Amino acid sequence: MLRLPKFALLEPRTVSEAVQLLAQHADARVVAGGTDILVNMKHEIETPSTLVSLERVAGLHGVRAMADGRITIGAMTRLAEVATDERIRRAHPALAQAASLVAGPQLRDMGTLGGNVLLDTRCQWINQSFFWRQALGFCLKKDGTKCHVVEGGSKCVAAASNDTAPALMSVDAQLRIASPRGERVLPIDELWLADGIYNKKLERDELLVAIELPPTPAGHRGAYGKLRERGSIDFPLYGVAVRLDLQGTTIARADLCAVALQARPLRLSKCAEILVGVDTASSAWDTAVDACAQTAWKLCHPMPNIPGDHEWRREMVPVYVKRTLRAALAATGPVHHV
Ligand SMILES: Cc1cc2nc3c(=O)[nH]c(=O)nc-3n(C[C@H](O)[C@H](O)[C@H](O)COP(=O)(O)OP(=O)(O)OC[C@H]3O[C@@H](n4cnc5c(N)ncnc54)[C@H](O)[C@@H]3O)c2cc1C
Ligand code: SF4
């Protein structure tokens, strides 16, 4: 049985108290739902002496809808709530669907949207017990000097594996971030770094307070497609979020964003360009869906960083892009294997 190492638990009541504690304790980490960081601590991938819990911090929980159509989701809002909130399901279907497919029901009841956005990258060579990693001779991400995925590689390419990230990118979410220096707002696309060791432009004393979603137009459609081996609890082997904004039957705006490839989620702008201006009631729609799928295949290169044969995962890219585009248009819900 894996045991948690010893740590001090601090329980601030306000955001300013929380960020002060993070600044005072150099190796402190935030714990939200704890469904990822506690596992990483058991595996000794992370070994903080202090955890700052957000559970009792006022103002971080819940969904608020503004009169102008914006929706603010507190960082501590549970994924189960994001998946079932009617306002999110209506205005941001891809996000609700992505949240509904994270892990299993118990983990969605504990795991938060903030924790999902800030989830650590994953790799089959690092997400293992200390014993197993030691047997491998460790790797660049922790305690070692080489990468087992890219021979001779000098950069960690562990994969961003957070299901909600592409859905949030597809609707241009903004992140409200607090620190002892004040508050800043960051477009979600600007959060990511191409570094699997730490793939975020977030300082260690910064706290994600809320995720803000701009309004979507009346003709907005969205869907999330998730490739995984089991329908019950797996991390994504490939995830794609689709946005289609329709004016009548014509696509006025489109976005496709993908995850479970490399350290940062990917915006597939070339796919979006194919779709804009297409009349979905004409045969041009089927042609565009095929072209989009082929372009996504060219842009998405799954690596042997996460489980599942990476060549098979690549062949599944066009399959999931097509299915998810069609599900978005028909508003039939998420695409996943059960
Ligand atoms: C068996 C299993 C299956 C899983 N399957 C999936 C899956 O399919 N898809 C998926 O996306 N995830 C999956 N997860 C991972 C995890 O459950 C979710 O990503 C969840 O949303 C993480 O949220 P949390 O609140 O538990 O995060 P925590 O574990 O509390 O935190 C995660 C990270 O974010 C940081 N953090 C959290 N909140 C904040 C904040 N407000 N400000 C600053 N830093 C913060 C923490 O310091 C930590 O580094 C799985 C986990 C397990 C154990
Ligand atoms: S990508 Fe390489 S360095 Fe990064 S966790 Fe995997 S094996 Fe380690």
Image: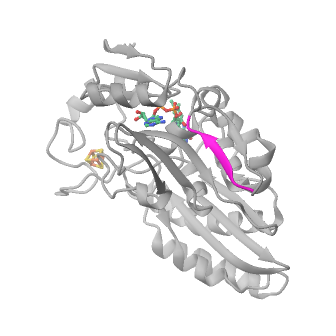
| Viewer-side residue, 230 vs 240 | 240
Residue 155 image offset from top left, x and y in percent: 23, 55
Relative to 304, is 65 on the left or the right? right
Residue 140 seen by the camera: yes
Residue that appears at 28% across and 19% down: 49
The residue at the point 50 percent across, 45 percent down is: 117
Query: Which percent across, then down, holds residue 286?
Result: 74, 81
Locate the C terminus and report the quarter of the image it occupies: top right
Residue 70 falls in image quadrant: bottom right
Compare residues 86 and 205 and report the one nearer the observer: 205
Residue at 31% across, 26% down: 28
Q: Residue at x 60, y 74 (%)?
A: 293
* Colouring scheme, one of rainbow, by chain, secondary structure, one colour: one colour
Is residue 42 at all visible to an observer of this figure?
A: no
> Foreground: 311 or 288?
288
Q: Position of residue 266 (x, y in %)?
A: 47, 64
Q: Range of the magenta residues?
A: 69-75
Determine which quarter of the picture holds residue 102: top right
Q: Determine if the magenta segment contains residue 71.
A: yes
* 210 in magenta: no
Q: Is residue 12 left or right of residue 72?
A: left
Q: In which quadrant of the rendered view does residue 288 lie?
A: bottom right
Q: Quadrant of the N terminus?
A: top left
Q: Please state the horizontal and vertical placement of residue 259, each as a whole percent of the image.
A: 50, 56
